[in-house]
Amino acid sequence: MHDDPKILAETKKYLADFNRLDAETRTAAELYEAMLALYPNRANPGSLWGGAKRAKTTAR
């Protein structure tokens, strides 16, 4: 079901994994590949690529 409350927990985990892998990788490509390894069937890999590029170009 598309509006199942478990989606919130899944999204929270996805975002936590993204943040963790952002800290563990050096480039957008590394971050993108690491996330794809964990979530190979996510619906929109283009959004992931955009997020990875943005994360790696943002001043820290």
Image (tube, helix red, strand yellow):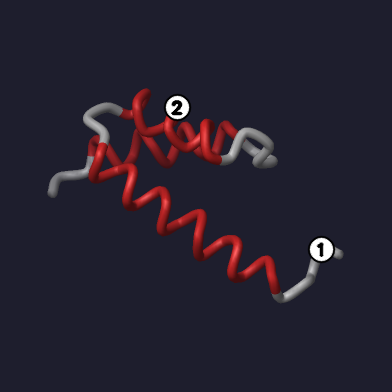
Q: Reply above or below: 51 against 11.
A: above
The numbered mark at residue 54 is none
In this picture, residue 2 sits left or right of residue 21: right
The residue at which mark 1 appears reads as: 2
Q: Which of 25 and 53 is in front in this view?
A: 25
SS class of the residue under badge 1?
loop
Q: In which quarter of the image is residue 21?
A: top left
Number of numbered markers: 2
The numbered mark at residue 33 is 2
Residue at the extreme front: 38
Q: In which quarter of the image is residue 25?
A: top left
Residue name at image x 79 percent, y 70 percent = 3
Q: Reply above or below: 29 against 4.
A: above
Mark 2 vs mark 1: give the one in front: 2
* Percent coordinates x, y for residue 40 in the rendering: 62, 33
* Percent coordinates x, y for residue 9 in the rendering: 59, 69
Give the CA separation, mark 2 to mark 1. Answer: 26 Å
Location of the N terminus by quadrant is bottom right
Q: Which amino acid does label 2 sit on?
A: Glu
Residue at the extreme bottom: 5
